[in-house]
Image: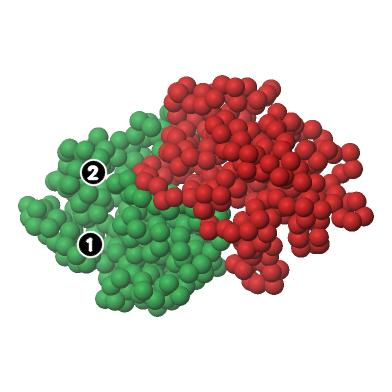
Chain colours: A green, B red
């Protein structure tokens, strides 16, 4: 399906790709809102799977070995006037939802992957990292009933967490060592995993959302001695994300920093890559 | 309870301790058979817990923060004429079971920790490492009904696996990439984890039995991209281990290399540390 792009977000993965990650060549952009010729608005899942191989038939199309990934792997993305996506990947956008809300469906779905993998409700959950992904994960944890703590370095970002989330500066968090059932690592920084291993209780779970683009030196003895479970987590389900955006269970508006026209993309990437940047959007 | 030591095994952990791991000072030895003054034989769990703290009361005494560990942490072990252990840690040894079988209860219990953490039955399970721990894990996997493959470097050790286990040399295992539901890493070598991440299927589980005593450089991107679950695994339940030793479900006899008198302990440690060594036992 060919969609006219209405709005597209710049993700940290796009910044990594622009520096050579995955060796991607082509058009980036995997968080977007587009419309058909008849004016219907859609967003889309980013994994384009074969739906025929054993992995797909085992119910894991996001892990299809011959998949392409929109704007990341072998498939042009949405930082353009038009984008082509498989029909099976489309999700309609509710009529009343503004583009600048709907464009968060993909990153919010990634945060909703965590409660799809592990029960958060009622658990003591720490989210490490007060960037965009960290805030989304903390809001999802709160929405599904976790006792949620957000741990970060930036007081002005920790303030975005809002009611019902305990926001803690990283230095203070040492007093919380070994006190969380689940720690969601979303710092974007390889050292985040070590902090996570310090905060989680014995036999607890660390969910790793940060894609480590480089090999990293790590002491793994605590993982064995304390029998920690470490869980990689990537793309997630769109329906709960769109539902939470619609009901307001998750209000992403504090995350929007700026909108640029597509032709100012270079400048927009620079803004998105500056320290402390929130979400930068591009409108073709 | 004071026990007269009848037989004690040398574990790879003892070799690490003798090189400075954990900074342990005292009498090592945590795999043993002892007897009371009345002649009753016992083996014992190694974690000496307070049974009062929140961690103990949450059913995780093996993770008690104030625990001592027999022959490893703050508690003299069994490489001596006598050893003192908490009564709660004792497990009686069935009358007909020879000492040299019963002395494997502790390491076999560690292997039985895996099916306590994750269902192995019916799953495609690869065990990495053809050393003592690897063989014990493979035998436990087979005993609980897993489709078991043992991957190792030593043809003569792979042959010990026996019927019902597919034994594969490491070089050949590359053709098995991404084909196992569960990979149990028991190589004792930090590079084993990378091999494990290659062999496990997307969204599969890697069980880490090797205690990484040193920080290690590792590419963790596959863990996130393929959503692998990494599970630390340490001490396990004695009852199924003693049962398997009694029924013959696990026959550990191929693992016994030699028995030394306790006074030849230095020589015995040298033998236990030589390449390809199997289990070396000490008799006081």
Query: Which tag is nearer the camera, tag 1 or tag 2?
Result: 2
Q: Position of residue B76 (x, y in %)?
A: 68, 59
Query: From the viewer's perspective, is B35 left or right of B280?
Result: right
Q: Position of residue A156 (x, y in %)?
A: 26, 76
Query: What residue do we see at 22% from left, 55% from top?
Result: A9
Q: Nearer the viewer, residue B187 or A98?
A: B187
Mark 2: give few (<14), some (14-19) or many (20+) Cα within 10 Å: some
Give above or below for B251 relative to A223: above
User: Which residue is situated farthest in the front direction here?
Assistant: B263
Asked if residue B45 shows in the view, the reply is: yes
Q: Earlier in the sequence, mark 1 or mark 2?
A: 2
Q: Which residue is mark 2?
A: A21
Chain under disc 2? A
Check contact, mark 1 vs mark 2: CB within 8 A. Answer: no
Marks 1 and 2, how far apart at CA? 20 Å
Total label count? 2
Mark 1: give few (<14), some (14-19) or many (20+) Cα within 10 Å: many
Query: What residue do we see at 41% from left, 45% from top?
Result: B223
Helix, strand or loop for disc 1: strand
Q: Which residue is mark 1?
A: A279
Give above or below for A170 relative to B33: below
Give above or below for B205 relative to B81: above
User: Which residue is situated farthest in the right direction here?
Assistant: B38
Which disc number belongs to residue A146?
Answer: none
Query: From the viewer's perspective, is B258 left or right of B129?
Result: right
Asked if residue A92 shows in the view, the reply is: no
Query: What residue do we see at 56% from left, 61% from top?
Result: A202
Whether callout 1 and callout 2 share a subunit is answered: yes
Q: Nearer the viewer, residue B71 or B238?
A: B71
């Amino acid at each position: 399906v060919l969609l006219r792009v209405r709005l597209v977000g710049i993700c940290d993965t796009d910044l990594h790709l622009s520096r050579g990650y995955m060796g991607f060549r082509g058009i980036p952009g995997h968080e977007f809102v587009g419309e058909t010729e008849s004016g219907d608005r859609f967003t889309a899942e980013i994994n384009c799977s074969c739906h025929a191989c054993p992995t797909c038939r085992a119910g894991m199309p996001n892990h299809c070995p011959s998949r392409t990934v929109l704007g990341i792997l072998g498939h042009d993305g949405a930082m353009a006037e038009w984008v082509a996506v498989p029909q099976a990947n489309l999700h309609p956008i509710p009529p009343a939802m503004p583009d600048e809300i709907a464009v968060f469906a993909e990153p919010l779905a990634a945060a909703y992957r965590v409660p799809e993998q592990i029960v958060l409700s009622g658990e003591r959950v720490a989210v490490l990292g007060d960037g965009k992904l960290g805030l989304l994960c903390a809001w999802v944890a709160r929405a599904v009933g976790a006792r949620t703590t957000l741990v970060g370095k930036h007081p002005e970002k920790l303030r975005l967490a809002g009611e019902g989330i305990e926001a803690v500066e990283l230095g203070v968090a040492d007093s919380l060592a070994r006190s969380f059932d689940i720690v969601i690592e979303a710092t974007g920084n390889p050292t985040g995993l070590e902090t996570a291993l310090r905060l989680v209780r014995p036999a607890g779970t660390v969910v790793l959302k940060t894609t480590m683009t480089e090999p990293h030196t790590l002491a793994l003895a605590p993982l064995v001695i304390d029998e920690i479970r470490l869980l990689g987590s990537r793309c997630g389900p769109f329906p709960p994300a769109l539902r939470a955006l619609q009901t307001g269970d998750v209000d992403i508006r504090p995350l929007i920093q700026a909108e640029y026209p597509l032709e100012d993309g270079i400048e927009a990437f620079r803004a998105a890559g500056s320290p402390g940047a929130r979400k930068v959007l591009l409108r073709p």
